[in-house]
Amino acid sequence: MLTLFRIAALVLFSFPAATAAEQLGTVSIIWDGEAQDWFTISDDTGDALIASASLKNGERLSSISIQAHPNPRFSSKNILSISLTYLGAFEPDTPPNEAEFIYTTNGMRPPFYTSAGAPIAPTVTIEGYEATQQDGQLTGTFSATLCLAKDLYGDVDTNDCKVLSGSFSTGILLR
């Protein structure tokens, strides 16, 4: 399911570093002992609404994608990506079949931190979910161990890992 993240990341990394946006919500994190508040955002491109938090609800496979930025605007650096995959339709009370966290500190250049290959699997709990036909609201908590990777999709160094925990409360775009 890493492919879903790769597609979402490439879409977000294609935006200019300071594109104006509207705040959708927040992702409060504790990264390596430091508390930080980050933002989920959206922007109307004229042709379509883009959002850094979305839910694709399918009959066979569903996914939630959250990209949090340190400021309420699209950026290419310091992005925390949370990708959740569910077999079948999304049910808020059901834990994801797969969860992946990636923290890109310098855009598409190292260092990268990822939960893929980390010694402890991430946990995510959806605490609240409301939706209309086009958008919704999602709240939850998470905990993950992220390890250093020299390449975005390369092997991780399990001797260089950091703990990430936090919560999110964000609007979401339904796709």
Image (spheres, rainbow, N blue to C red):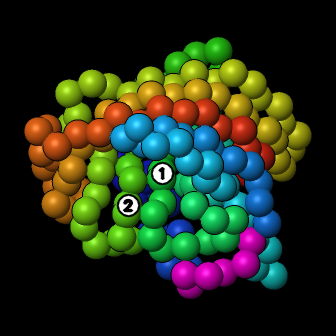
Q: Is residue 96 above or below residue 105?
A: above
Q: Is residue 126 above or below residue 173?
A: above
Residue 53 located within the stretch drawn in magenta: no
Classified by dominant secondary structure, the portion drawn in magenta counts as loop
- The answer to whether mark 2 and mark 1 are in CB contact below 8 A is yes
Q: Position of residue 52 (x, y in %)?
A: 63, 58
Judge left or right: residue 31 versus residue 43.
left
Please report the residue visible at 64 percent of the width from the left and 28 percent of the height from the top: 140
Q: Nearer the N terminus, badge 2 or badge 1?
A: 1
Categorize mark 2 by other alpha carbons within 10 Å: few (<14), some (14-19), many (20+).
many
Q: Which dot marks residue 81? A: 1
| Disc 2/disc 1 C-alpha distance (Å) | 8 Å
Q: Amino acid at mark 1?
A: Ser
Please identify the residue farthest to the front as the structure is shown: 34
Q: 165 or 117: which is nearer to us?
A: 165
Please report the residue visible at 67 percent of the width from the left and 55 percent of the height from the top: 40
Residue topped by disc 2? 104
